[in-house]
Amino acid sequence: MFLFSFFETAMTIFWAILQLALIILIVPLTLYGFIIGAPIFFSPKKGIGEILAECHVKPGEKFYDLGAGNGRAMILAAKKFNLDVYGFELSPLLVLIAKLNLLLCGVKKSTIYLKNLYNEDLSNADIIFCFLTPKAMERLRPKFEKELRPGTRIISYAFPLKDWQPKKIIRNGYPGNMYLYEKS
């Protein structure tokens, strides 16, 4: 009986330490992601589908989701448009949720990275999706100008890309507009 009680106490302490360690590791990274990119708000699926249709996508094109969140845009791009999807997210918790969502939805051609999107090479992207703050979009603009190939499409939900002329704006009653840009 004593051994069982000792084991039970040890397991309780172990789980408490594990939970505390996860909180110490995950919460600061998640908050940091909110500060430099965007808080967690989900893009409307219908709007993502409409703007992707305007991109005239070809199956197998590379779709990059910057600040991928729960993977919602990645799932839609893969399932409905047959795109190869890549996500960049700074929150470990959201990366885990996105991976689980992608798996449960049967998306096979997908990769989600626990990485800072500002430090990643975007030159292989055919389509980039962003639902980020105006400050984050402003910070990405020089990166887009430097790294993206001509013809790369950029979709920005809610916030325009300063000094770029949108190819299309979709206003369908969403909380924000969908902006489609094409790198010249």
Image (cartoon, rainbow, N blue to C red):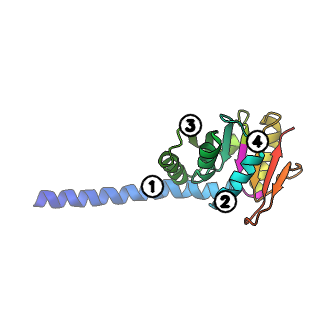
Whole-percent x, y for residue 72 in the image? 60, 53
Q: Is residue 138 visible?
A: no
Q: Give SS at disc 2.
A: loop
Q: Earlier in the sequence, mark 2 or mark 4?
A: 2
Q: Which residues are magenta?
A: 128-134
Q: Which residue type does callout 4 highlight?
A: His
Q: Give the number of the mark in front: 2 or 4.
A: 4
Q: Name the residue at 76% across, 52% down.
A: 156
Residue 2 in which image quadrant: bottom left
| Residue 163 % position (x, y) | 89, 50
Q: Amino acid at mark 3?
A: Lys
**Residue at 78% over, 38% down:** 152
Q: What residue is drawn where x is 57% and y is 54%?
A: 70
| Left or right for 48, reference 181 | left
The residue where tag 1 is placed is 22
Sequence-earlier tag: 3 or 4:
4
Where, quadrant-wise, is the C terminus in this rendering? top right
Mark 2 to mark 4: distance in Å? 19 Å
List the residue tagged with mark 4.
56
Q: Tell me the CA gap for discs 2 and 1.
A: 30 Å
Q: Gap in Å between the C-alphas at discs 3 and 2?
A: 22 Å
Q: Is tag 3's residue or tag 1's residue first in the polypeptide sequence?
A: 1
**Residue hosting label 2:** 44
User: Where does residue 131 sit, x and y in percent of width and height?
Assistant: 70, 55
Q: Secondary structure at mark 3?
A: loop
Closer to the camera, 20 or 55? Answer: 55
Q: Is residue 131 covered in magenta?
A: yes
Identify the secondary structure beneath mark 4. loop
